[in-house]
Amino acid sequence: MAEKIGGGLNASSSNDGNTYMISPNDSKTHPTIKVRSLYLDPESDVRKSGKTKWNERMGGLIVYSVGKRPGRPMKPGRIFLKVDVEKLWKEGDEGQVHGTLCRQLLGYQPSQISEAGGCLSGFAVINGEFRVNSGTCNTGKVYSDRRSNMGDFERKVVKKAIDMWREGRADGQNIMVSALID
């Protein structure tokens, strides 16, 4: 049976444990997003284990969909991590961290992605601690319950992926959802 994810995104795991689905608030106007893997974007500041200092301040952005916004194609589950993001902030970036990440990766702000029917999620790793609040990303209009925190299930899956990359247990940049769901 599918596990419902509380808070944050309207998401549930698949019965077979190979994907998780992010459901829209209105299934007549927007598709369900199927996430088969989490993928570490090559532009991220994360390197192979031992070269990244995970005790630094990192902002994280997960792109599930850009909606109808043009740009480079991305499969759901792309994770973008940057160190000291607040130093890259520019006038017009939404929030302190995630608007900057969104602009750098996609060329848009989170509200623009949400208005286009897209779906983002934001987090941070601060002093080695995984944090799950983002008022700019986790409160999207189409796929979210409008709370700023990640849901329990998404938090568990994303944290496990981050831990695998941090500890050098991931075989490359791509981690299948089946390896993340207990």
Image (tube, rainbow, N blue to C red):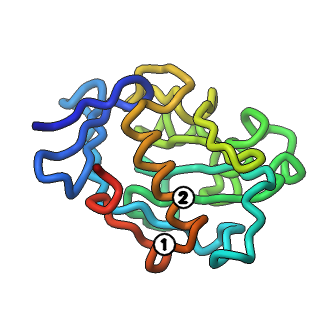
Q: Which amino acid does label 2 sit on?
A: Asp
For mark 1, does the 10 Å Cα neighbourhood hold few (<14), some (14 to 19), or many (20 or more) residues? Answer: few
Cβ–Cβ under 8 Å for marks 2 and 1: yes
Q: What residue type is labelled 1?
A: Arg
Task: Give left or right: position of 21 versus 66.
Answer: left
Percent of width and height locating residue 173: 49, 74
Asked if 101 appears above or below 7 in the picture, the reply is: below
Q: Which residue is drawn at 50% across and 64% down?
A: 164
- Quadrant of the rendered structure where residue 55 is? bottom right
Task: Give left or right: position of 109 versus 145.
Answer: right
Q: Name the residue under label 1.
A: 169
Q: What element carries label 2?
A: helix
Whether residue 68 is visible, yes or no, is: no
Percent of width and height locating residue 86: 84, 46
Percent of width and height locating residue 144: 41, 27
Whether residue 149 is visible, yes or no, is: yes
